Amino acid sequence: MNRAAISIPEKLFFKIGEVCDICGVQAHVLRYWESEFPTLAPQKNRAGQRTYRKRDVEMVLHIKELLYEDQYTIAGAKKKLTNELRGASKLKVVTPEMSAQAAGTSPAPQLVPPAPESSAEEAPPAPAVRSRNIPAERESAPEAEVELTDDRREALRRLRQQMRDLLSLLDSDETRSKARR
């Protein structure tokens, strides 16, 4: 089965029978996969019927491909999906300087600030932050200091908000899956 060959209709919600027709599996198989794969979690409407979204249908197709074509076991497919989701969640912070550099409109941002001229109003250096993942012997190695500009602070604020949004989505998914059990 080639995933590109299957066209998913442009609808907001699909009933379980429609998903069965699109994906070529039976309803009991879909219900079993829902119990085995936490990433496949269709909502239920007021009547208690499963309502699949397009992303759910795509997930069903992907699970079917892993199990039937790539010959993964259920456990292997779970691991593969988990690794794929982890890889997709790695975010990259792009500051305005970086996007301008990619566009070729300005020179590369200066990561190490120039040596300040001696001044009585010079600010004290920022304290070193110890990372939990760096061994003590590597931590003492001198590193280039990165200037924290307003643009970078704003990029970090946006990243922090995005991370909070992702955590709240994950928490809501966990509570939904626990409520189903």
Image (cartoon, rainbow, N blue to C red):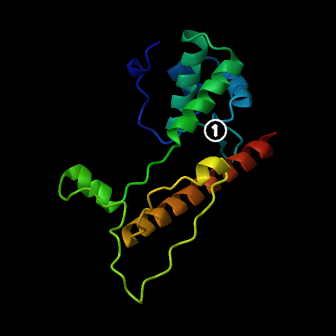
Picture coordinates of residue 16 (x, y %)? Answer: 61, 29
> 40 left or right of 149?
right
Q: Quadrant of residue 119?
A: bottom left
Task: Report the label total.
Answer: 1
Picture coordinates of residue 68 (x, y %)? Answer: 58, 11
Dot 1 alpha-carbon crowd within 10 angstroms: few under 14, some 14 to 19, many 20 or more: many
Residue identifier under label 1: 42
Residue shown at the point (59%, 55%) measured from the top left: 140
Q: Is residue 69 above or below residue 14?
A: above
Q: In terms of depth relative to the viewer, which is nearer, 166 or 111?
A: 111
Residue shown at the point (67%, 47%) measured from the top left: 173
Question: Which three-letter amino acid code belongs to the residue tagged 1?
Answer: Pro
**Which residue reaches farthest bottom?**
120
Residue shown at the point (53%, 30%) measured from the top left: 57
Q: In terms of depth relative to the viewer, which is nearer, 140 or 108?
A: 140
Residue 134 visible? The answer is: no
Q: In terms of depth relative to the viewer, which is nearer, 66 or 177?
A: 66
> 138 left or right of 121?
right
Q: Is residue 121 above or below residue 5?
A: below
Report helix, strand or loop for mark 1: loop
Q: Is residue 91 above or below residue 165?
A: above
**Which residue reaches farthest right?**
181
Residue 25 visible? The answer is: yes
Picture coordinates of residue 15 (x, y %)? Answer: 58, 33
Q: In terms of depth relative to the viewer, which is nearer, 85 or 33?
A: 85
Q: Is residue 173 above or below residue 77?
A: below
